[in-house]
Image (cartoon, rainbow, N blue to C red):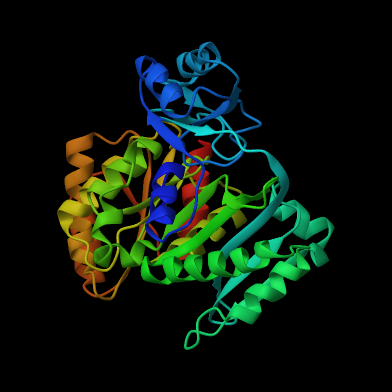
Amino acid sequence: MNLHEYQAKALLAEYGIALPRSELIDDVAQCAQAWQRLGGGECVAKAQVHAGGRGKAGGVRRCRSLADLEQAARELLGQRLVTHQNAPDGQPVQRLLVEQSLPVARELYLSLTVDRAAERVVLIASAAGGVEIEQVAARTPEAVLRETVHPVTGLMDYQGRNLAYALGLSGEAVAAFVRLGKALYRLFVERDLGLLEINPLVLTEDGRLMPLDCKMVVDDNALWRQPALAAQQDLAQLDPKEAEAHRHGVNYIALDGDIGCMVNGAGLAMATMDLIQRAGGRPANFLDVGGSATAASVAEAFRIILADPKVRSVLINIFGGIVRCDLIAEGIIQAVREVGVRVPVVVRLEGTHAEQGRQMLAESGLAIIPAADLTEAARRAVEEARR
């Protein structure tokens, strides 16, 4: 689950991390008060969307006067900001974070994430802040510095100093970097994050280290023990179909193909999408109904797939383990009758009560195309979409 920048920075403040002074606004009428509270000097207005590349897309505006700030608010609030990460439709801008400008001497990069291979949290830093770290890693991998954290000891002071010296910091900035790294690691672990990225982390002309931008991603699987963070989720930033799926407990991600997919299990869903691609087609979505699917949730998932106007055929691939195939069949029949499906539906059922499920579909009187195996199902779904 993504957090907005202003939400991420509120968490940073809770852990004692110094930040630039800022004000959050959602209306042009609030500009004057925000300007005054920030001292009436130069500031930066930043559109709050769940996407990177805001600056290049015009979502970050330097404002040298109140008139500049009001113009930025008029042009951004209520609009959709399109960046290279959320094209072509963009995401709605409902709030601006107005932040004081700082005299910047250097821009650095700092992040924490999980190294799956090492089974450890890793602290990553680079002197090339303010640019996309993927470009730095591709062109100059030696510029990306790493410290792997042992879960028993946590981030050690010497690890912070190693990175600080490698970044060219000196004096009080080294101690400040060590304190910052330890606070960020504690936040990362205690709040069940999957990613914490500060880009840029700036060294001001008077020697202070401050995060100018911050991105946080919370592990969805841990939201049950992070209710305060779960309550901050902004569903308006999601594709409408994804938001609807979230409300019904269905794992759905919209893609740009034309073959709708409904599968139980993330691994099987990925394999299904691979076979569609191999057969020459393109999946329109990732949809995992999970192991506790019911007829009602399957019907709802079917409606979400069909809400995509690009869908030209639907492939349903269910392996009945925990979830029974006859319940899936009941949901398919219910959805087809209620929604009025106008595209071909290919179904492959295997596992628990698969025979009963196939019989229910055959006796339903509906135009549902059975498939004996997954390869055949993918090929048939692609053929039907082309027609």
Residue 43 picture quarter: top right
Quadrant where the N terminus sits is bottom left
| Front-lying residue, 106 or 193 | 106
Instruction: Give how far across and how far down residue 308 sits, in percent.
Output: 39, 35
Instruction: Give how far across and how far down residue 214 sits, in percent.
Output: 52, 49
| Front-lying residue, 90 or 326 | 90
Query: In the displayed structure, would residue 82 be above or below residue 116?
Result: above
Query: In the displayed structure, would residue 346 be above or below residue 184?
Result: above
Query: In the displayed structure, would residue 122 be above or below residue 238?
Result: below
Q: Is residue 297 visible?
A: yes
Which residue corresponds to the image point at 62% horizontal and 38% vertical from the top-left?
102
Which residue corresponds to the image point at 32% horizontal and 42% vertical from the top-left?
243
Instruction: Give how far across and how far down residue 281 sits, in percent.
Output: 57, 47
In the image, 12: left or right of 292? right
In the image, 175: left or right of 187? right
Instruction: Give how far across and how far down residue 45 sits, in percent.
Output: 52, 28
